[in-house]
Image: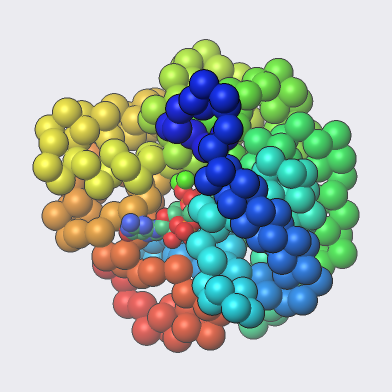
Amino acid sequence: VAKGRSLGVAGYDPRDDVNTRQRLALLGDLRRALSNDELYLVYQPKVSLTDGQVHSAEALLRWRHPERGLVPPDAFIPLAENTGLIGAITKHVLNLALAQARVWTDAGQPLKIAVNTSARNLHDEDFDRVVRGLLTEHGVDAGQLLLEVTESALMADPVRARQLLQSLAAQGVSISIDDFGAGYTSIKQLRSLPISELKVDRSFVQAMEQDAGEELIVRSVIELGRNLGLTTVAEGVETTEALVKLVSFGCDTAQGYVLAKPMPVAEFDRWRADWRGL
Ligand code: C2E
Ligand code: CA
Ligand code: CA
Ligand code: CA
């Protein structure tokens, strides 16, 4: 039953059948997409607010569906998460991202690549082995990979998540907490995790423009990150005003449309060649 809809007395809603059928069809398509090269990555620069340079980029998944056109990740990642297909998808994403990291390194333009993970990946016994295997296969240094883990994924099973993250961090992989700010992770928990970066959820960054209360949240998260010795990142930065504010708050890194949208590799390379700093 879809969220936000009442079950009704009989618990039956014909719209659910339609939804279920559509989701099943999409799931079948997604399985096929994995082997058909329909999934590809776009890259969004993470720009340092200290030196104005691009040291890293976030890989974001795109699906070019043969009939539906571009399907946004929000429309298929949750489906993959609920059906277990996310393990194969994350592996595919890592494969593409590490191959690209290698290309940039070989071209003398190394970048740290940020890859998104799901809660399920953190509960997969094998995940650290998979990551290690792919790093070796592509000849990429673990220090060039950063895994973004959402705050909510961490909260789902903090003990298990901590073990897995510790194993990954011990290999040299960096860990970032994504969508931070609404999940009530305690300072104690944060300190017990082997993380190096805190990303302020873009909803706060965007609301900051109109609302002083939201601005206070952004400032507090940045201050918390700094006090814990973490790199702080603001995502979803859409205006110069927001960028200026973030600099004044001491935020380390920014990501957002005001700097660059997520781009396919060729476009990313052109953008990067033209980038002259802030
Ligand atoms: P996220 O990890 O929080 O990624 C940031 C999202 O904000 C991306 O949406 C990005 O395109 C968008 N964005 C970047 N700058 C701006 C901006 O200035 N303004 C606005 N309004 N949006 C901006 P996208 O690419 O549609 O991805 C949505 C979500 O899907 C991601 O949120 C992430 O949770 C998930 N996702 C994307 N790729 C992957 C993946 O490879 N694996 C997993 N597990 N999840 C992924
Ligand atoms: Ca992310
Ligand atoms: Ca995010
Ligand atoms: Ca998100």
Left or right for 238, reference 148: left
Q: Is residue 105 visible?
A: no
Give 184 or 176, whichever is nearer the viewer: 184
- Identify the colour scheme used: rainbow
Q: In the rendered view of the protein, which quadrant contains the N terminus?
A: top right
- Residue 225, position in %: x, y? 41, 31
Q: In the rendered view of the protein, which quadrant contains the C terminus?
A: bottom left
- Residue 226, position in %: x, y? 38, 32
Left or right for 20, reference 73: right
Residue 240 found in image quarter: bottom left
Left or right for 204, reference 88: left
For image coordinates 74% across by 44% down, the residue present is 83
Q: In the figure, 12 relative to 32: above or below? A: above
Give 61 or 35, whichever is nearer the viewer: 35
Left or right for 203, reference 46: left
For image coordinates 39% across by 28% down, the residue present is 182
Q: Is residue 257 visible?
A: yes
Give 28 or 116, whichever is nearer the viewer: 28
For image coordinates 19% across by 51% down, the residue present is 242
Number of numbered discs: 0
List the single residue furthest toward the front: 10
Q: In the figure, 240 relative to 273: above or below? A: above
For image coordinates 29% across by 39% down, the residue present is 204
Give 132 or 228, whichever is nearer the viewer: 132
Residue 16 found in image quarter: top right
- Residue 82, position in %: x, y? 69, 41
Residue 73 found in image quarter: bottom right
